[in-house]
């Protein structure tokens, strides 16, 4: 059978989006690996599945597979593309959309200017909820990587993040340290590794090594985690504008128990079909 798909991106973080509401198919990690290959497949950072909800209080179910076939809990840039997709495909007429994910329920708002604002829910700092191995909760932890000490913030935005502050994000050893942090034994489900440069109280630069995908042009949940870490540790003030290799995101966080609000663009690249 042939499945229709849409290729989209949020600040260069790219996705293959499948409508499994009007089309019916069983998608497996094998399909994600096959289609995710940039030489022999469609090529993407993540595969996004739009499904009918199992919860009557939400509009859709949203599933995410990395290009390596691993299923993940959350993807902020993907959430913005998800919102544009269901509206453009007329799967809904709503501009305020509630979506269930593996990491919890999120709320999406498609603004009149085409930007998408996402309520990502509150961050989680309890080590067991990240998950991260630590004797007690703290804003900063010492992590030993290759014999050197890194000071990281460990938190969950529906998926696990480790945020490290660096002097210069352009020269930071993201490709060297990223995979070592991702697979560090203190993160039992692996982790996304963010490298943050603070420019001033409300502006910063960020690069992210994503779990299961490598370095991407942008990571929405990574930007949320970096902004939260910076605000919590007193480096920055909300709202925060972060510049990623693919473009800029605006993040708002009012403090403990408050949700993180992320605003940014989503763009359609092309339509296609794949044979299942």
Image: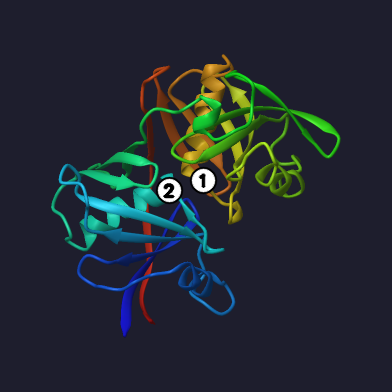
Query: Which element is circle 1 on?
Result: loop
| Up/down of 39 relative to 261, above or below | below
**Along the horizontal axis of the image, is 196 left or right of 109?**
right
Could you say where residue 66 lies in the image, as x and y percent from the top left? 51, 59
Q: Classify 10 Å Cα crowding around label 1: few (below 14), some (14-19), many (20 and above).
A: many
Residue under numbered circle 1? 219
Q: Classify 10 Å Cα crowding around label 2: few (below 14), some (14-19), many (20 and above).
A: many
**Along the horizontal axis of the image, is 264 left or right of 58?**
right
Query: Which element is circle 2 on?
Result: helix
Circles 1, 2 touching at the beta carbon (< 8 Å): yes
| Up/down of 97 relative to 195, above or below | below
- Quarter where residue 88 is shown: bottom left
Could you say where residue 51 lies in the image, as x and y percent from the top left? 26, 59
* Residue 250, numbered circle: none
- Taking the spot 32% from the left edge, 53% from the top edge, the residue there is 62
- Taking the spot 55% from the left edge, 35% from the top edge, the residue there is 131
> Mark 2 or mark 1, which is nearer the start of the sequence?
2
Could you say where residue 214 lies in the image, as x and y percent from the top left? 63, 54
* Residue 77, numbered circle: 2
| Up/down of 131 relative to 86, above or below | above
Q: Residue furthest top?
A: 234
Q: Nearer the viewer, residue 18 or 63?
A: 63
How much space separates mark 1 and mark 2, taking CA atoms? 6 Å
Q: Quadrant of the C terminus?
A: bottom left
**Along the horizontal axis of the image, is 238 left or right of 146?**
left
- Taking the spot 36% from the left edge, 27% from the top edge, the residue there is 259
- Taking the spot 75% from the left edge, 43% from the top edge, the residue there is 177
Q: Nearer the viewer, residue 221 or 218?
A: 221
């Amino acid at each position: 059978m042939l499945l229709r798909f849409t290729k989209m991106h949020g600040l260069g973080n790219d996705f293959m989006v499948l409508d499994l509401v009007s089309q019916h198919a069983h998608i497996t990690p094998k399909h994600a690996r096959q289609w995710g290959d940039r030489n022999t497949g469609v090529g993407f950072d993540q595969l996004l599945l739009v499904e009918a909800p199992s919860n009557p209080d939400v509009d859709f179910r949203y599933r995410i597979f990395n290009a390596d076939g691993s299923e993940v809990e959350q993807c902020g840039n993907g959430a913005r593309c998800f919102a544009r997709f269901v509206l453009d495909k007329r799967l809904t007429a709503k501009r305020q959309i509630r979506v269930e994910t593996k990491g919890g329920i999120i709320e999406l708002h498609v603004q009149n200017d085409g930007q998408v604002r996402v309520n990502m829910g509150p961050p989680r700092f309890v080590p067991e909820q990240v998950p991260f191995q630590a004797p007690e909760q703290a804003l900063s932890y010492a992590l030993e990587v290759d014999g050197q000490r890194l000071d990281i913030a460990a938190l969950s935005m529906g998926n696990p993040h480790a945020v490290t502050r660096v002097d210069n994000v352009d020269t930071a050893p993201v490709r060297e340290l990223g995979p070592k942090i991702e697979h560090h034994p203190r993160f039992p489900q692996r982790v996304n590794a963010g490298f943050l440069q603070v420019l001033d109280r409300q502006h910063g630069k960020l690069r992210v090594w994503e779990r299961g995908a490598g370095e991407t042009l942008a990571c929405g949940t990574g930007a949320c985690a970096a902004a939260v870490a910076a605000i919590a540790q007193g480096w920055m003030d909300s709202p925060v504008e972060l510049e990623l290799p693919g473009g800029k995101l605006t993040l708002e966080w009012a403090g403990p128990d408050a949700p993180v609000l992320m605003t940014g663009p989503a763009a359609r690249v092309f339509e296609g079909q794949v044979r299942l």
